[in-house]
Amino acid sequence: MTQVGIIGAGPAGLLLSHLLHQQGIASVVLETRSRDYVERRVRAGVLEQRSADLLTSSGVGERMRREGLVHDGISLRFAGEQYRIDFRKLTGRGITVYGQQEVVKDLIKQRLADGGEIWFETEVTAIEGIGGDHPRIQYRRNHDPASLECDFVAGCDGSHGVSRTKFPSPSGGGHGGGSRVYERTYPFAWLGILAKTPPASDELIYAYHERGFALHSMRSPEISRLYLQVDADETMDAWPEARIWDELRVRLDEPRLHAGEIVEAGITPMRSLVTEPMQRGRLFLAGDAAHIVPATGAKGMNLALADVKALAEALTAWYRSKSRDLLDRYSDSCLRRVWRAEQFSAWMTGLLHRDPAGDPFDHKLRLSYLRYIVTSEAAATTLAENYVGFEGA
Ligand code: APR
Ligand code: PHB
């Protein structure tokens, strides 16, 4: 028995458990993977300023402040031209580049130091009784089935988790039980590598090229994170290392990029998805379990952290005063921010990717829009204020 049963030890589940602990609320985090696996899983790495501030104000931002790379802008490249979008000048804010698995490591370390319960290698198989006051999480640990009773269940188990099965599936028409799923797929994916090579640029480079999109990001002065747009059905077999580096140099227009040892490589599909509402009875979804954004806008981890901040506040209000008010409004309070990020991510994706079936007219429109962004302060501000995190949503 615990107060809040949290499924998933990603950024969402771990930060929620930390924030609840700070309010004296007990939780158990159930995670199907091992600690080693979740600490090594390479994902995105851009924190909006408010996400970095949240980690700092809740006492888990010390290493991020030491090792994270604060960036005041990004570079946009297209048609042989390059421009800088100056976030600091346009918005007064910046971003911090710090890998998601570093956030995960910091949170696990803090939770364990505080005596927190994280049950690794524990697969949740079902959630029962969410319509009543004592929902139960069914799980399997060392092959033995067992169940955990709690007051509330937080579904922080990502896009392939078990919590989503309590909501309509997108392929099932998107309707059911008063909730709805909105979804969009894209005809391309991202091939991502993590490589032991110094970044060729101080800031992220977003490149639009006739051959497709490319992104140059980084994790440290020695490690680069690089992405290429590939077709949705492509596999790594088609991408020997030499081809990856050649393609990156061409699309990024960056001959200085040195091929280094590739320590991780994989292909990630691009998808947009929103579940409305993000709650049912005593089950509350947060992070990727509730919504997915294509990675172009770098919003995934930021949305996850903002969701659990709201959820922790709502649960705290419930335990303090038994008021369900904030809990009832949890989904509404998240969805405006979620949809802002969805629109921005879909827009950035459309702006920077080559549609495999697209015609030359689309290509010309994209180039014109990119030129508009780099010559109009109003257009550049639109990109900048959404990238650093629009706070009016
Ligand atoms: N039982 C227990 N754990 C599960 C189950 C299950 N049945 N299904 C999934 N999980 C775990 C996964 O192994 C994973 O560790 O839930 C966790 C979900 O974590 P994330 O996928 O990282 O999702 P979230 O915490 O919402 O993070 C959101 O961070 O870096 C980004 O790309 C990432 O956008 C995503 C964001
Ligand atoms: C990353 O560093 O992994 C990264 C950066 C920006 C993005 C996506 C991923 O838009």
Image (cartoon, rainbow, N blue to C red):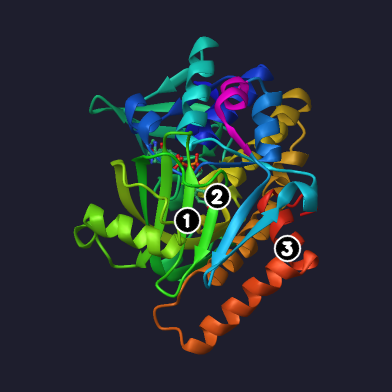
The image quarter containing residue 62 is top right
Which residue in the rendered view is the most extreme toward the front? 256
Mark 2 touches mark 1? (CB < 8 Å): yes
Mark 2 is on which residue type?
Answer: Leu
- Residue at image point 50% right, 59% down: 294
- Residue sitting nearer the eye, 238 or 11: 238
Q: Specify the quarter for ligand 1.
A: top left
In the figure, is residue 276 to the left or right of 141? right
Mark 3 is on which residue type?
Answer: Ala
The answer to whether any part of residue 293 appears in the image is no
The image quadrant where one finds the C terminus is: bottom right
Secondary-structure class at tag 1: strand
The image quarter containing residue 195 is top left
The image quarter containing residue 255 is bottom left
Q: Would the CB of label 1 be found within 8 Å of ligand 2?
A: yes
In this figure, which residue is indicated by the disc labeled 2? 204
- Residue at image point 44% right, 50% down: 159
The answer to whether any part of residue 100 appears in the image is yes
State which region is magenta. Answer: 60-70
In this figure, which residue is indicated by the disc labeled 1? 215
